[in-house]
Image (cartoon, rainbow, N blue to C red):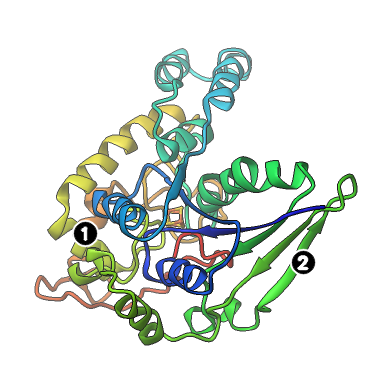
């Protein structure tokens, strides 16, 4: 007889924390809490997940591993790039950085030779969704057990979450008959409901919410708003320093100096030859401006969204 396992994805954000508290409050059986660490989280978020682990429920941390894919890419570069006539100096620079660092986000970008972007959103899938499927859900389904994937998404967050069903069957395994279900019990909750759940259980929210962050997760996220980027630069300059170093490494890993080799890329990147808008430092300078980037506004801490959408993953894995 199969067992039903309940898997809650914890991001360190308010919604997934409320979701975990709800699962515990209901006395949910065979409960697992999982944190997919991207390697690009703010240290406060990593510490907050540890706090939840210590005070609320044991949380298993998992990470994506790109070791094999980077090794295969190195072989590809050595053979194919040279055959394609790529400059030897470029080949050697790429091979020099084609080594896993153990940081999932950076290793993903080294393998891809580029950063993810608002149009090429492979980060959430590669760093969160796939590791959870491969390392947590698939072994349970392989064993013939059912899996209920709890997702902390809310209708009022975005248009593509508005019409999501509370429950949906995603997969029925032909070999074992095991079923994978998505379950979204806080779909109709408001932000106030979410923070009320924290208070009800005496759990403090992630402290980043009190430091100007509208959402927590990667620091910065590729979907960061202009005002959030400015807040990050002012409060956590060490995170910008880290990304700047990553730009150098990923710049060496890519074949051409095109879109994707700076952390934030240009709009209209469907044109493959479009150039990025510049380094993260240039983007920070832009974040200090108003009026289309032409005028400095150093006192502004809340800004327009500049058409950049928040994370649109319907899984809510990035909060
Ligand atoms: S938080 Fe943002 S940058 Fe990080 S994986 Fe999610 S979408 Fe990508």
First in residue order: circle 1 vs circle 2 = 2
Secondary element type, mark 1 = helix
In this picture, is 132 found above or below 306? above
Quadrant hosting residue 13: bottom left
Image quadrant of ligand 1 equals bottom left
Secondary element type, mark 2 = strand
- The crowding category of the residue bearing disc 1, from other C-alpha atoms within 10 Å (few below 14, some 14 to 19, many at least 20), is many
Left or right: 319, with 172 as reference point: left
- The residue under label 2 is 169
Q: Residue furthest left?
A: 299
In this picture, is 215 found above or below 55? below
- Residue at left offset 19%, top offset 71%: 210
- Residue at left offset 22%, top offset 49%: 281
In this picture, is 234 found above or below 42? below
Mark 1 or mark 2, whichever is nearer to me: 2
Residue 8 coordinates in the image, percent (x, y): 53, 60
> How far is mark 1 from mark 2, CA to CA?
39 Å
Q: Nearer the viewer, residue 61 or 256?
A: 61
From the image, which quarter does the C terminus lie in?
Answer: bottom left
């Amino acid at each position: 007889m199969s067992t039903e396992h309940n898997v809650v994805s914890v991001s360190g954000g308010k919604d997934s924390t409320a979701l975990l508290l709800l699962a515990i409050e209901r006395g949910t059986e065979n409960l697992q809490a999982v944190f997919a660490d991207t390697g690009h989280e703010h240290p406060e978020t990593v510490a907050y997940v540890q706090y939840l682990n210590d005070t609320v429920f044991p949380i298993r941390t998992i990470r994506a591993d790109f070791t094999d894919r980077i090794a295969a890419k190195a072989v590809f570069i050595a053979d194919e790039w040279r055959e394609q006539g790529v400059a030897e100096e470029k080949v050697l620079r790429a091979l020099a950085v084609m080594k896993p660092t153990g940081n999932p986000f950076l290793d993903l970008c080294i393998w891809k030779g580029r950063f993810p972007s608002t149009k090429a959103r492979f980060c959430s899938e590669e760093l969160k969704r796939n590791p959870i499927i491969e390392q947590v859900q698939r072994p349970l389904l392989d064993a013939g057990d059912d899996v209920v994937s709890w997702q902390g998404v809310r209708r009022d967050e975005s248009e593509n979450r508005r019409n999501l069903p509370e429950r949906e069957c995603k997969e029925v395994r032909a070999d074992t008959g095991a079923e994978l279900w998505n379950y979204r019990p806080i779909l109709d909750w408001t932000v106030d409901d979410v923070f009320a759940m924290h208070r009800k259980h005496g759990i403090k929210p992630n402290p980043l919410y009190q430091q100007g962050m509208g959402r927590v997760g990667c620091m910065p996220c590729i979907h960061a708003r202009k005002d959030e980027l400015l807040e990050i630069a002012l409060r956590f300059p060490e995170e910008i320093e880290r990304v700047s170093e990553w730009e150098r490494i990923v710049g060496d890993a890519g074949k051409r100096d095109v879109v994707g080799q700076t952390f934030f890329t240009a709009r209209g990147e469907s044109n493959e030859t479009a150039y990025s808008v510049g380094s993260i430092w240039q983007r920070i300078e832009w974040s200090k401006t108003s009026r289309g980037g032409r005028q400095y506004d150093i006192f502004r801490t809340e800004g327009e969204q500049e058409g950049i959408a928040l994370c649109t993953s319907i899984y809510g894995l990035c909060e």
